[in-house]
Amino acid sequence: MLATVGCGSQAAKVNPMQTPAANVQVSPIPIPTPGVALPPAHVFVIVMENRSYSEALAGGYTAKLAHRYAYATNYHGVTHPSLPNYLAMTSGSTWGITDDGFHALPAGGLGAQLTDAGVSWRAYMEGMNNGCFHSGYPYALKHNPFAYYGSSCPANVVPFTDFAHDMTQPDIPRFVWITPGLCNDGHDCSTAVADAYLSHTVPQILATTAWQQDGVLFITWDEGEDAANSVLTLVIQPNQKPRTSDVAYNHYSLLAAIENRLGVGHLGKAAGASPMPDLVG
């Protein structure tokens, strides 16, 4: 799964039978100048819903982002329906789940991994107004994978109404996850509605110092609507030249890329997945 992301000279060998030792000049080893500490890496993720690769690119703003930054042309969801894809993105496993119901899973997953590593994180859930387990439409528990691990609602999972304010603060979490509601993510509403949501949300991320100082924003879709389960995945970084990749990637690749960027180990099948190096760098 995204990582966070002295020199000296060697004297030439001298034959003492040819050159007196007193005449051998050894350059002093320079003391390196302390470097400027790089800002900690920040990773942002937005997960949209139920569009194949070509359908997602039909959104005008989405297409603009793709052609301005980088995107994967051969990326696929790992299964159907939604929930196991969200679990794959956040734990490296579908846990054998083949439906969207609630399943009590062992404590763990990406959130717990980051907490244990001292990496700050926050997951923003649109429509969540009464906790992870008792909020109504447009919130969907099946799109909040963090609530499944340990059957609990971490304090890091907050309503999306906190997002705009948090993006103006100096202490933006190093990992930010966004789950739009069932309309804005494209599940219940049109591609145009989902595209408009991105056009409003993405600029708020790109305006942050956290993103501008070597941050990365991933936008992906949970599953495709075609036989190949193809989805569009965007990789948006500052000072990035436009590029595409036709390497086969999936949600385990995304998790590996996130974990690499944040400097933590790989969970589950992310350990055997490519972290999209040609897109993320």
Image: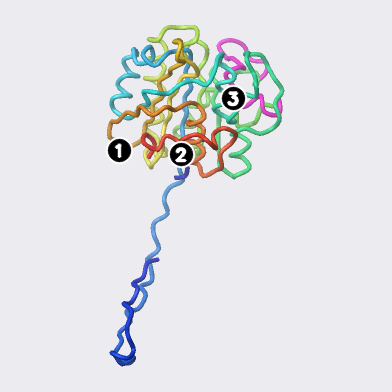
Residue type (three-letter) at the residue carrying disc 3: Leu
| Badge number at residue 110 | none
Q: Which residue is drawn at 33% across and 37% down?
A: 238
Of 181 and 32, which appears nearest the observer?
32
Q: Reply yes or no: does residue 147 show up in magenta.
A: yes
N-terminal label among 3 and 2: 2
N-terminal label among 1 and 2: 2
Q: What element carries label 3?
A: helix
Q: Residue at x 28, y 27 (%)?
A: 68
- Residue 41 position in % (x across, y down): 45, 42
Residue type (three-letter) at the residue carrying disc 2: His
Q: How far apart are the two marked residues, 1 and 2, measured between alpha carbons?
A: 15 Å
Crowding at dot 1, Cα within 10 Å, few <14 / some 14-19 / many 20+, comes out as few
> Where is mark 1, residue-wise?
239
Q: Are marks 3 and 2 in contact (CB under 8 Å)?
A: no
- Residue 143 position in % (x across, y down): 57, 19
- Say above or below: 195 vs 41: above
Asked which quadrant contains residue 149, the reply is top right
**In front: label 3 or label 2:** 3
> Where is mark 2, residue-wise?
42
| Residues shaded magenta | 133-151
- Say above or below: 140 vs 40: above
Crowding at dot 3, Cα within 10 Å, few <14 / some 14-19 / many 20+, comes out as many
- Say above or below: 167 vs 228: below
Q: Specify whether 165 is left or right of 149.
A: left
